[in-house]
């Protein structure tokens, strides 16, 4: 049956259908063309299984830790915090016995999930969509501690205070699993006889959907790699004072695993997005907010909050 114009009409008319009563399978009994149609607010999905893969764009990772101490780092005078005490240019690392900047690049911060694989099941009975995700995650964050208790002897022989900052850079990699459900809030689900889109019959569709949704999930992340770098840096007085290596920076930990790093992390997530399916091909884009149910460390409260966007491509059957 060659009816490609019907597909276009259905997709362009979603807004007007939302004002009409929802059609059910019972109302379509005896219809040889339409097998299933649900449209408008809170539509019912047809029964299907979908597979997709994609990536995550991190928009913001918020780190919460104030006045904490942990046995997993080298001892410091004060406490760790997420607030950077550096003033303008103070965190520039200098070359040995020179005021020129070194070539060392500070690592980028933030969160990403470069690989996400998803399986989802449409459940017409409730109606909702159940889904399970497997993903590979990377998280990079820093903590700071300011010490102003130390003095150095100036050329005039006068003890001078200076600002010394301890920095902890934590690079972590995870394998994670996420279970959740989504509820379609507006859109269309349609299943019908096959529609031929060309004269050869090679391209045809028998179902389509386009809907907006909200959802929630629980995630468990297993720590597989932990590389912590801890260093102390002279923030001011760089022209008058250096460490024994001639630099303003001394490394205390170099890509070492934190002994107090929590091996498993739990998160709760809320999301909202749009998904469309045309025959076997599907596309999904969703915004999410992830909230920690535990700490990064076993002996201190360090929590990471994440916000971003996911894009996935896949197929449905």
Image (cartoon, rainbow, N blue to C red):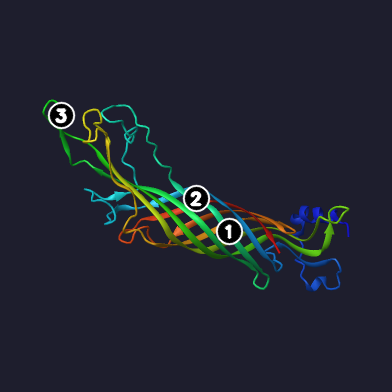
Residue at horizontal 12 percent and vertical 25 percent from the top: 156
Residue 212 in percent (x, y) is at 65, 57
The residue pinned by badge 2 equals: 112
Q: Residues within 10 Å of mark 3 (few under 14, many from 20)?
A: few
Q: Residues within 10 Å of mark 2 (few under 14, many from 20)?
A: many
Residue at horizontal 43 percent and vertical 42 percent from the top: 108
* Quadrant in the rendering for residue 188: bottom right
Give the label, 3 or 1, closer to the camera. 1
* Quadrant in the rendering for residue 155: top left
Q: Earlier in the sequence, mark 1 or mark 2?
A: 2
Residue at horizontal 18 percent and vertical 42 percent from the top: 149
Give the label, 1 or 2, closer to the camera. 1
Residue 22 appears left or right of 307: right
Quote the CA–CA distance across marks 3 and 2.
46 Å
Viewer-side residue, 304 vs 203? 203
Q: Earlier in the sequence, mark 3 or mark 1?
A: 1
Residue 84 in percent (x, y) is at 34, 42
Q: Which mark is residue 170?
A: none
Quote the CA–CA distance across marks 1 and 2.
14 Å
Viewer-side residue, 193 vs 254? 254
Residue 158 appears left or right of 313: left
Q: Is residue 181 above or below residue 111?
A: below
Classify mark 2: helix, strand or loop: strand
The residue pinned by badge 3 equals: 154
The residue pinned by badge 1 equals: 117
């Amino acid at each position: 049956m060659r009816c490609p114009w019907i597909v276009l009409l259905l997709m362009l008319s979603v807004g007007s259908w939302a004002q009409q009563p929802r059609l059910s399978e019972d109302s379509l009994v005896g219809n040889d063309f339409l097998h299933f149609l649900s449209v408008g607010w809170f539509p019912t999905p047809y029964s299907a299984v979908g597979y997709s893969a994609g990536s995550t764009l991190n928009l913001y990772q918020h780190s919460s830790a104030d006045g904490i101490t942990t046995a997993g780092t080298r001892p410091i005078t004060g406490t760790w915090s997420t607030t950077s005490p550096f003033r303008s240019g103070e965190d520039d690392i200098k070359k040995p016995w020179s005021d020129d900047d070194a070539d060392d690049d500070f690592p980028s911060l933030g969160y990403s999930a470069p690989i996400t694989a998803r399986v989802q099941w449409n459940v017409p009975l409730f109606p909702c969509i159940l889904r399970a995700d497997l993903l590979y995650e990377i998280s990079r964050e820093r903590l700071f501690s300011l010490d102003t208790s130390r003095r150095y002897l100036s050329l005039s022989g006068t003890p001078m205070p200076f600002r010394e900052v301890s920095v902890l850079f934590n690079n972590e990699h995870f394998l994670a699993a996420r279970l959740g459900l989504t509820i379609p809030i507006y859109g269309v689900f349609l299943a019908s006889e096959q529609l031929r889109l060309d004269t050869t019959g090679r391209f045809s569709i028998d179902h389509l959907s386009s809907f907006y949704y909200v959802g929630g999930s629980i995630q468990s992340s297993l720590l597989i790699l932990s590389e912590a770098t801890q260093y102390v840096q002279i923030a001011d007085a760089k022209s008058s004072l250096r460490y024994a290596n001639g630099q303003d920076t001394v490394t205390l930990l170099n890509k070492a695993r934190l002994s107090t790093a929590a091996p498993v992390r739990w998160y709760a997530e809320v999301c909202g997005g749009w998904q469309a399916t045309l025959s076997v091909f599907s596309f999904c884009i969703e915004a999410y907010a992830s909230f920690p149910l535990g700490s990064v460390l076993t002996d201190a409260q360090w929590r990471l909050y994440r916000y971003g966007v996911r894009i996935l491509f896949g197929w449905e059957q």
